[in-house]
Amino acid sequence: MTYIPQNFEQCIGIPGLSENMLRNHFALYEGYVKNTNTIAELAKTIEPGTPQSAELRRRFGWEWDGMRLHELYFGNLTKEDVEPSSAPELMKAIEQAYGSFDAWKMDIEKAMMMRGIGWVVFAKDRETGGLFTLWINEHDGGHLVGTEPLLVLDVFEHAYMTDYGIKRADYVDVVMHAIDWRVVEERFVKSS
């Protein structure tokens, strides 16, 4: 199967995220798609069980996760002003799990401010319905098996350095206001 890069033009115009930075970020994402396809094809030509085959399998997971995490990230951003109240089922679950939306927001923002590179993912355990804030270092380390990503936030430097330098907190504030709660609600409902 060949994977085709998705179009995320709906992100252009998000207040606080420049078009230049977004287009660079889209190009980075397209590289993950290209590498996913390249490795999938190359793996067909390598003898199974060899060190080369093992390394391709490892690299495929990294490229695949980079592709999918970016798709989820861009997919849950919008330039529209979408209030959390547009996700009533999710808000009810967040209040049950965290006590309040504000407590949940503080948890997510603290995770986004952690030193280091990676992803912050708000996920749901498919088996128990439990909600988690995850830190995914790189693309392939930190996923909890059996969880469904509901909200994906990129905190690699490429997501904010062009616009904010080392002021990650300014980026966090912008991204928290750009969440498309309708998309997150849809992911939450589908995961039930």
Image: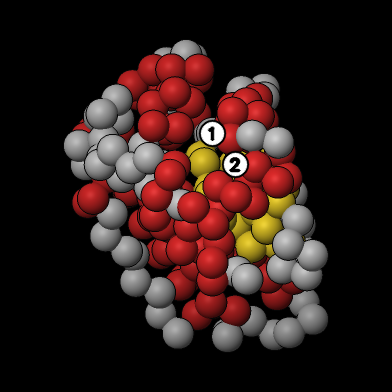
How many C-alpha atoms fall within 10 Å of the one at disc 1: few (<14), some, or many (≥20)?
A: many
Residue 48 visible (yes or no)? yes
Q: Secondary structure at mark 1?
A: loop
* 103 relative to 166, above or below: below
- Return the x and y of residue 187 as percentages of the image width and height: 51, 63
Look at the image and tell me in which quarter the N terminus lies.
bottom left
Identity of the residue drawn at 34% across and 71% down: 4
Look at the image and tell me in which quarter the C terminus lies.
bottom right
Mark 1: which amino acid?
Answer: Val
- Return the x and y of residue 99 as percentages of the image width and height: 70, 36
The image quadrant that residue 18 belongs to is: top left
State which tag comes first along the sequence, 1 or 2: 2
Between 148 and 181, the one lying in front of the other is 181
Between 7 and 98, the one lying in front of the other is 98
The image quadrant that residue 134 belongs to is: top right
Label 1 sits on residue: 155
